[in-house]
Amino acid sequence: MSKTAWKGIGANLLKILLLLFAVSLITFILVELSPIDAVSSYIGESDVSDAQRARIAEYWGLNDPPATRYVKWITNILHGDMGTSMIYRQPVIKVIGERFQLSLILMTISWIVSGLFGLLLGVVAAVKQGRPADKVIKVYCLLLESSPAFWIGIVLLLFFAVYLDLLPMGLAAPIGTPLSEATMGQRIYHLILPALALSLTGISKIALQTREKMIQVLESDYALFARTRGERVWTIVRRHGLRNILLPFITLQFGSISELFGGSVLAESVFTYPGLGEATVQSGLKGDIPLFLGIALFSALFVFCGNLIANILYAVVDPRIREGGRIE
Amino acid sequence: MTKTLVQTKGRLRNRRSKTILIVTAALAVLVILTVAGMTMNPERYATNFSEKNLPPSASHLFGTDWMGRDMFMRTIKGLSTSIYIGLLASVVTSVVALFLGVLAGTVGRWATTAFNWAVDLFMGVPHLILLILISVLVGRGARGVMIGVIATHWCPLGRIVQAEIMSLKNSQYVQASMRMGKSKWWIAMRHMLPHVIPQFVVGLVLMFPHAIMHEASITFLGFGLPAEQPAIGVILSESMKYLTTGMWWLALLPGLCLLGNDLSRINLPLQNFLEG
């Protein structure tokens, strides 16, 4: 890669840092404005006297002005301490770390499956444009795109878990077995449905967009010229099509990370899969501020990293950028 | 030669009238659903313990739940709420996007930079997280959902509008108008806005199902509309508890209706309609 390309990546990293800072500030202000009472969410259901409440507030430093608390929070994060989760009674960083492992497996599988199938369906639909295969794929994609992710999950549950009784209702391991003791097979067995639900929702967007781009390529002058030279359609797809749709595909695939994260929150809550998404919902419902702030920041970091990788991949894939163009 | 010309013209007119037909039909369905839901007598989906857990039948199309409430009526009522919220949210969002996009494109360099930063920021945090955050902040309920949808959905359309304005800026007629001493506001209103309107309408229609889907999702998770309101999200989240007992109708049918509702978005023909 050329010097300019590296410079572009550097500028990108700087931008990510600034954006993360902005995200932390805005989420902090939003939470500060919210009616959540940190002390009540800490003590939960138990009965506590006013004096004890005051002591708890003192202990957590809740009496300091917001600005002081923000600076303290940020400094602690820079030292690797994101505070303590109030509902799990564990350091936030540990909760996120443990749960993110589970979510990451789920998201990675769905990301790859939906990317590959989306690409495949899109290319087939474009090549068979206007014919039955195209119409079937289009209707299928429109149907999927119009149905909410969590409902697809519920329908899958109804069919595979309740009606056929083939797959488990939820969780990441059999009931009563701690996750650390579950076998590989058991874990895969519990992953199938959530991963399927999450992949299904991702496919349609990628397929429809790929179809659009591929049709543009196939209608271009160079594709026509290739055809007059006697190349077959699939050869044209391989030699001209895939190369030309690669850039928009990368944009789309990495751009889908944000939606994937949101989708995993829904899928995990349908399948009671104990990942980061489930923790997000719990922390929001029960007002666990440190955990929620941590997750918001972490999810932003995750999305920004996806964008960064996409930018680097552009430089790897596209010779024009590799040779010193600007990275947008 | 003339024959083919006439033929193409005929086909075009056909497509146009077909589009009008589809649009009208879809709109009619939406209006009927909304009106039916809004004017519905709450008695129709009241609890009735003598008729609980019934599978779908002629008298209860979608069956009843564990409190004997008629699921068909609850679904219609829920859809009507969803349409109402979705419509309001997507109209406000589109106007916000249009306003911000035009502002970013006309005021100056710093406005463009600020706009791009804001878009990056809002696109950086996953929508669902932001939605949860906002609805916790505003207090759960329809208002929180609506503000959340507006805050998360203005980015793509705003960016399209801004790009369009930027490219219009370099066009000859805008340049000429500027040299003739017209104000920025005048140029934006007279020369730029009319070009952006088609994108605005398409963006609005595309946003509608998104807004509804996000409303249902956030309600499903427990952050949106309150549990006593008949909303699709509430119905589906309640149905989760009864899946294992074989009460499939509680989840399947209301969800199908939401799907059908989203499908009525008619986006594909609408584009042709506006352009031709």
Image: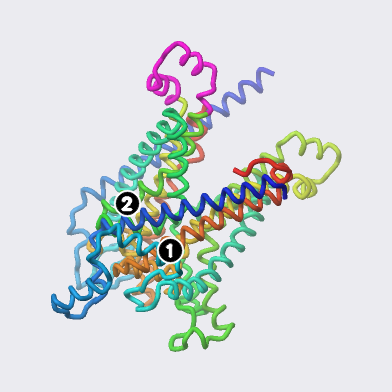
**Res B21 label:** none
Position of A139 with respect to A83 (left or right) is right
Q: Residue A140: image x %, image y %?
A: 55, 54
- Tell me which amino acid carries mark 2: Ser
- In the rendered image, which residue does mark 1 sit on? A150
Q: Residue A82: image x %, image y %?
A: 40, 69
- Please state which of residues B138 and B65 is positioned toward the viewer in this rendering: B138
* Label 1 residue SS: helix
* Residue in view at x 21 percent, y 48 percent: B39
- Model colouring: rainbow
> Does B45 appear above or below B276?
below
Chain under numbered label 2: B
- In the rendered image, which residue does mark 2 sit on? B82
Q: Is residue A279 visible?
A: yes
How many residues crowd mark 1 within 10 Å: few (<14), some (14–19), many (20+)? many
> Does A127 appear above or below B199?
below
* Residue in view at x 38 percent, y 54 percent: B214
Q: Is residue B64 magenta?
A: no
Q: Is residue B57 visible?
A: no
Q: Quadrant of residue A45?
A: bottom left
Calculate the distance from the C-alpha at mark 1 to the C-alpha at mark 2.
16 Å
- Please state which of residues A103 and A221 is positioned toward the viewer in this rendering: A103
- Tell me which amino acid carries mark 1: Phe
Span colored in magenta: B167-194
Q: Is residue B177 magenta?
A: yes
* Residue in view at x 54 percent, y 21 percent: B171
**Marks 1, 2 in one chain:** no
* Label 2 residue SS: helix
